[in-house]
Image (cartoon, rainbow, N blue to C red):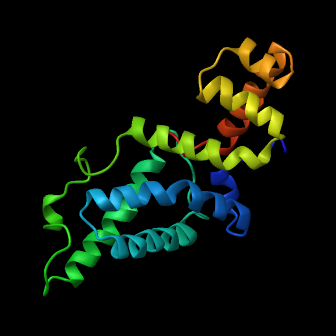
Amino acid sequence: MDSTSPSLLQRLATGTDAPAWDRFVELYTPLLLRWCARLGVSEPDAADFVQDVFVVAVQQLPQFRYDAAQSFRAWLKTVLLNGWRKHQRRRARGPAIGGDPDLVPDTDPGILVDEAEHRDHLLRRALEIARTDFEPETWAACWEFLVNDRPAADVAAELGVTVNAVYLAKSRVLRHLRTELAGLID
């Protein structure tokens, strides 16, 4: 693991980092599908919407510059809603797939996720995905201590390591996640 690796957003901005795009897709596909479901989009259409969001991301993220005053989640939500509205306009001659697009304000908390849910989703997905970035023992120590909320002494005894090793494992994994998710979580 490279402890000084750039954030995932920085890696996406190059436009050529295939592993970064794979990670981005792994992180965001479930969340985008959830947003589509809240908009009333059918599963087959949701898969198309998510692909459309990724196409826009591929086109626009190389020019995207993180601004702490802005929200990446809001940008992504806007991309999805714009695609949904465009789709609704095209289907105006037929039955709508989720209601009138003008009745879905961008700020409606019932439609999409709030910041806490977004952060929770990203952290859990990032933890699942980052598993391969660490030695199994380091990962197990962090997971048991942080996610399963077990006492460090119990985890250390089970893994045959010191309590300090458990704290170090947690620290390493969290540092990695903070670096990789910089800019993605507001």
In the rendered image, is residue 69 in sight? no
For residue 72, above or below residue 185: below
Q: Quadrant of the N terminus?
A: top right
For residue 138, above or below residue 100: above
Residue 127, quarter of picture: top right
Total numbered labels placed on residues in the image: 0
Task: Decide if residue 48 is on the left or right side of residue 26.
Answer: left
Q: Residue at the spot x=24%, y=63% of the render?
A: 40
In the rendered image, is residue 89 in sight? yes
Q: Residue furthest front?
A: 158
Q: Residue at the spot x=78%, y=22% of the render?
A: 158
Residue 75, quarter of picture: bottom left
Q: Residue furthest bottom?
A: 93
Task: Decide if residue 66 is on the left or right side of residue 4.
Answer: left
Frontmost residue, 18 versus 98: 98
Q: Residue at the spot x=57%, y=47% of the render?
A: 125
Residue 116, quarter of picture: top left
Frontmost residue, 84 versus 70: 84
Task: Decide if residue 30 is on the left or right side of residue 146.
Answer: left
Q: Position of residue 22 (x, y in %)?
A: 65, 64
For residue 172, above or below residue 180: above
For residue 168, above or below residue 47: above
Q: Position of residue 23 (x, y in %)?
A: 65, 58
Q: Residue at the spot x=39%, y=72% of the render?
A: 49
Q: Position of residue 72 (x, y in %)?
A: 48, 49
Q: Position of residue 155 (x, y in %)?
A: 74, 20
